[in-house]
Image (cartoon, rainbow, N blue to C red):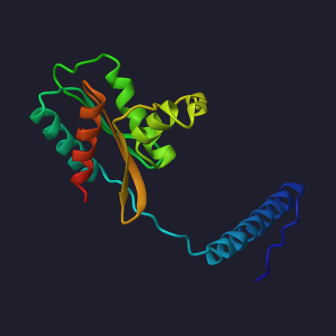
């Protein structure tokens, strides 16, 4: 029996080279990927405000608003200021509340303090704070801290600044 010999044609050589290059490329791509996977540092973890907790905070705030007979808008945001829950109660007092409530919550998160503090600063020692565009410097925004970590904020816009603040604090009490 004789073995049939095949001649290496240009097309066959090209396919062989392509296959060899493909195998080499796969091998090269896997080395950095495996090295990167092995070199991942330990990253810190952080608590996050879940939907369930945000709903609990909002429900406590709604309950307080109902007790005060002051319907309005209540917003709960995460630590980036993004809305998780926003509730517009029936017969909300002001049309602007839909914008004010999440704005207050976001401002409380970004400044890491109650918006009542910001309002007081504008009215007193720090009027230049009013130039911080895009923030709502009115009572009714509270940062939400869990285990001393900022996880979000609550903003309330109902009828009066004092009611806004009281309702926001009732929402906070749901997680303390």
> Image quarter for residue 153?
top left
* Residue 146 position by quadrant: bottom left
Question: Can residue 82 be seen at all in this image of the molecule?
Answer: no
Residue shown at the point (31%, 30%) measured from the top left: 161
**Image height check: is 34 above or below 64?**
below
Return the x and y of residue 45 as percentages of the image width and height: 47, 68
Q: How many marks?
A: 0
In-front residue for pair 7/50: 50
Q: Residue at x 72, y 70 (%)?
A: 32
Residue 73 in the figure: left or right of residue 12? left
* Quarter placement of the C terminus: bottom left
- The residue drawn where x is 60% and y is 28% is 131
Residue 10, x across and y down, in percent? 90, 56
Residue at 40%, 62% (x, y): give it: 47
Q: Between residues 132 and 29, which one lies in front from this camera angle?
A: 132
Q: Position of residue 167 (x, y in %)?
A: 23, 39
Up the image or down, 147 lies above or below 105; here it is: below
Q: Is residue 149 above or below residue 166?
A: below
Q: Is residue 126 above or below residue 9?
A: above
């Amino acid at each position: 029996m004789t073995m049939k010999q095949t001649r290496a044609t240009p097309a066959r050589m090209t396919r062989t080279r392509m296959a060899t290059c493909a195998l080499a490329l796969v091998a090269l791509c896997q080395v950095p990927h495996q090295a990167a996977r092995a070199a991942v540092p330990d990253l810190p973890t952080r608590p996050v405000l879940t939907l369930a907790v945000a709903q609990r905070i909002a429900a406590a705030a709604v309950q307080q608003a109902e007790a005060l007979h002051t319907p309005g808008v209540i917003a709960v945001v995460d630590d980036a200021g993004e809305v998780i829950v926003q509730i517009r109660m029936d017969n909300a007092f002001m049309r602007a509340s839909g914008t004010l409530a999440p704005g207050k919550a976001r401002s409380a998160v970004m400044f890491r303090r109650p918006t009542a503090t910001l309002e007081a600063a504008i009215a007193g020692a720090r009027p230049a704070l009013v130039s911080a565009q895009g923030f709502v410097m009115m009572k009714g925004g509270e940062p939400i801290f869990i285990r001393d970590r900022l996880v979000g904020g609550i903003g309330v816009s109902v009828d009066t600044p004092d009611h806004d603040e009281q309702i926001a604090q009732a929402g906070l009490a749901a997680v303390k």
